[in-house]
Image: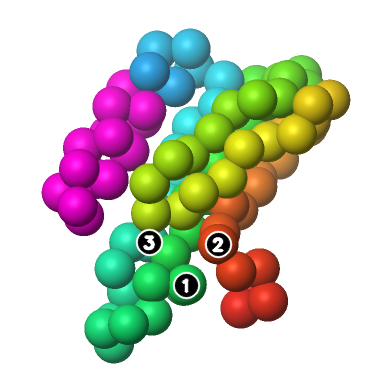
Amino acid sequence: MKKTILTLQFALLLFLTANAQIVITEVMFNPPPSGTDTLEYIELYNNSGSSVDISGWHFTEGVTFTFPAATSLAANAYVVITENEAYF
């Protein structure tokens, strides 16, 4: 399962790098100690000079999340996606 998640994340990384606007800058999967999967997260960065619409973008394994309608990532901004935001 973790291997599948890592493969999907790298595939997404390649796709996003090709567009050169949103970049995956950090991935935390399966953090120690075991049983702390709620601490998994993905960090995205908008390296462009303008806002990027990320409405409907989603993650389906590990960190499960869909960006709601009308969601944009501002120029040069970061966003962290996690299952449990109380830890961050």
Q: Is residue 25 toward the left or the right of residue 50 in the image?
A: left
The answer to whether residue 72 is seen in the rendering is no
Q: Residue at x 68, y 36 (%)?
A: 67
Residue 50 point in image, percent of width and height: 76, 19
The answer to whether residue 19 is seen in the rendering is yes
SS assignment at label 1 = helix
Residue 26 point in image, percent of width and height: 43, 51
Q: Which residues are magenta?
A: 1-14
What residue does disc 3 label? 28
Residue type at mark 2: give it. Glu
Residue 38: which disc?
1
Residue type at mark 3: give it. Met
Quadrant of res 47 = top right
Q: Is the C terminus in the top left, top right, bottom left or bottom right quadrant?
A: bottom right
Q: Marks 1 and 3: which is nearer the front? A: 1
- Real-space CA distance between mark 1 and mark 3, rounded to the nearest whole angstrom: 10 Å
Q: Is residue 3 toward the left or the right of residue 21 in the image?
A: left
Residue 21 point in image, percent of width and height: 57, 20
Residue with the most extreme left position: 3
What residue does disc 2 label? 83
Dot 2 alpha-carbon crowd within 10 angstroms: few under 14, some 14 to 19, many 20 or more: some
SS assignment at label 3 = strand
- Real-space CA distance between mark 2 and mark 1, rounded to the nearest whole angstrom: 6 Å
Residue type at mark 1: give it. Thr
